[in-house]
Image (cartoon, grey):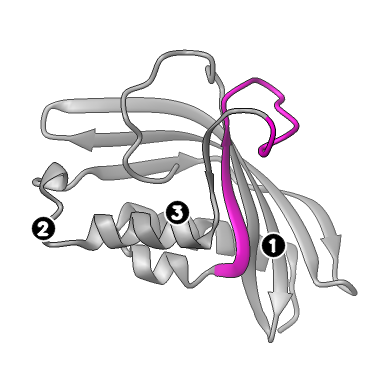
Amino acid sequence: MTVTRESLIDFIYDEVRMLDEGRYTEWLDLWLPDGHYWMPLDYQQKDPINETSLMYEDMFMLKLRVERLNGARTFSQKPKSRCHHVIQRPYVDEMDTEAGRFVTTTFMHYVETRLDEQQLLAVTARHELALVEGRLRIANKRVDIVNCDAAFRNIQLLP
């Protein structure tokens, strides 16, 4: 596979569509086994390990989240939460085709809804992508909420 700016941008659009359509198992397949999904608690936070984060999930935790979202007996998700991403065209910040390493930044509005509750978040997503066996995969994803220091209701899905 030859990675182009357009293929990186298409990858980001495909990822948010999977999430919006509730295709979580397919979304999980985009990830590398040692990947992390990080949502910092503080503005410009540098360390996910020694500082508290809203989320810092490895593949084990992401699989648990997906199993819960897909589960028939997950009563807290009856009816299921739904989400909608409205994204700007992603920026391609780094393209190291020799190393198969790519970084994108995407600004978006994320809406999560369940019953009569709706939550709107303005976020910036930074994807570290890798080309592995001819496929783009997510090595790490960082999602910064613009007003990260505010009080939030539970975030059930994945911005």
Label drawn at residue 49: none
**Badge 2 or badge 1: first in the primary sequence:** 2
Is 60 or 113 nearer to us in this picture? 60
Q: Position of residue 28 (x, y in %)?
A: 45, 66
Quarter holding residue 41: top right
Q: Amino acid at mark 1?
A: Leu
Q: Name the mark nearer the viewer: 2 or 1.
A: 2
Q: Which residue is mark 3?
A: 16
Q: Which residues are magenta?
A: 31-50
Q: Residues within 10 Å of mark 2 (few under 14, many from 20)?
A: few
Q: Position of residue 61 (x, y in %)?
A: 45, 55
Is 19 or 142 nearer to us in this picture? 142
Assess whether residue 19 is covered by the magenta stretch: no
Q: Quadrant of the C terminus?
A: top left
Label drawn at residue 73: 2
Judged left or right of residue 46, residue 30 is left
Query: How far, Cα to Cα, is label 3 from label 1?
Result: 15 Å
Contact flag, marks 3 and 1 (Cβ < 8 Å): no
